[in-house]
Image (cartoon, grey):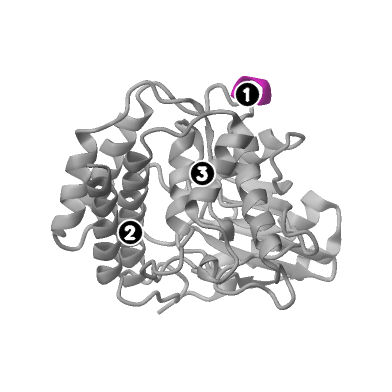
Amino acid sequence: MTASVEAYAGLDRLGPALSEALGDDRWVEASATLVAGGKSNLTFEVESAAGAVILRRPPAGDLLPSAHDMGREARIQRALQGTAVPVAQVLLEDDGDLIGAPFYVMEKVIGHSIREHLPAGYAERARDKVALADGLVDALAALHQVDPDEVGLADFGRPQGYLERQVRRWNDQWARSKSHDVAAVTELGSRLSGCIPTNPQTSIVHGDYRLDNCMMDLDDPARVRAVLDWEMSTLGDPLTDLALMLLYWREPGDRRFQLTPAVTQAAGFPGRRHLVERYEQTTGRPVENLAFYEAFAHYKFAVIAQGIAARVAADAMAGQQFGDLDAEVLLIADEGLERLERED
């Protein structure tokens, strides 16, 4: 039986903890609502007479090693406060003793979370859609230009050998999470292992950067109010972030993914080439070996999709369902192989 939202959020213990942390007894009587769209960690809006905050916690059940690290998410958002990267303020965190799972609570940022459709009356003109794309790219470029040493994140990852470790890690994740062999995924992982770029750049990376992981300003489509979902953040190659954003940025004629919105297929949105050019312009750095990075983004996303399927099957996603993910995994892997073939 699927646990209740109140049980996942641990409201009987979370409410009093919020009351103490925020100095407001009204948090003792709180309610929680599951926020749709969270496919890895679970996100809840917690409300009381004092207002609303956001709770992040892992799914239930057995978890893959190094995944769903709530402390990591909280740490990087605290570190980026005061930089050009927009992040939510972290209000409370716990390593698991309080509600039976690690979690953190952050402020609720007011803005648009854009998934399948633009909000009514929002970014209706083509120039506003271009501005939205530019704002999304500029926030990513701002992250990649933060000096980790200056914000206390010098030990946040091991950038040396990052790409090699990433390919090995996702090979391992695939082996652990797959329900059956998928030749396209195996081939994609093998081919990536043999064409890893040398001398990559280094920066803070988000790890899952995309439009629906950002809160967009209610009035200004060019402004990102907060970048969310920092679970996979580390120090590494910034082009992995750019390529993953390109994967999620679907163009007219692209095949649809079930697990990611396709709002950018609407008329007026610029294509992926525009995003790449904007990134180069904003960072002042050329984008090289893009086929590898795009193919790796597809490989990573195929493995993530398989992990989601496994958690749904184990009833660890608070009752959420996502359709036929076996077909999704194959589609993503095939598209990744197409990226490599295009480069060849």
What residue is shown at x 67% (from left), y 33% (from top)? 79
- Position of 50 with respect to 16 (left or right) is right
Coordinates of residue 183 in the picture (x, y in percent): 13, 57
Of marks 1 and 3, the one in the foreground: 3
Looking at the rendered structure, the kind of residue marked 3 is Val
SS category of the residue bearing label 2: helix
Q: Which mark is residue 56?
A: none
Residue sitting nearer the eye, 197 or 84 = 197
Looking at the rendered structure, the kind of residue marked 2 is Gly
Residue 64 seen from this side: no
Coordinates of residue 269 in the picture (x, y in percent): 58, 63
What residue is shown at x 34% (from left), y 61% (from top)? 305
Disc 3/disc 2 C-alpha distance (Å): 29 Å
Q: Quadrant of residue 306?
A: bottom left
The residue under label 3 is 276
The residue under label 1 is 147
Looking at the rendered structure, the kind of residue marked 1 is Asp
Mark 1 / mark 3, whichever is N-terminal:
1
State the quadrant of the N terminus: bottom left
Mark 3 / mark 2, whichever is N-terminal:
3
Which residues, given as a range, are shown in magenta? Answer: 147-152
Residue sitting nearer the eye, 253 or 57 = 253
Number of other residues with Cα within 10 Å of mark 2, as a class: few under 14, some 14 to 19, many 20 or more: many
- Position of 199 with respect to 51 (left or right) is left
Residue sitting nearer the eye, 245 or 1 = 245
Q: Looking at the image, is 216 positioned above or below residue 49?
A: above
The residue under label 2 is 307
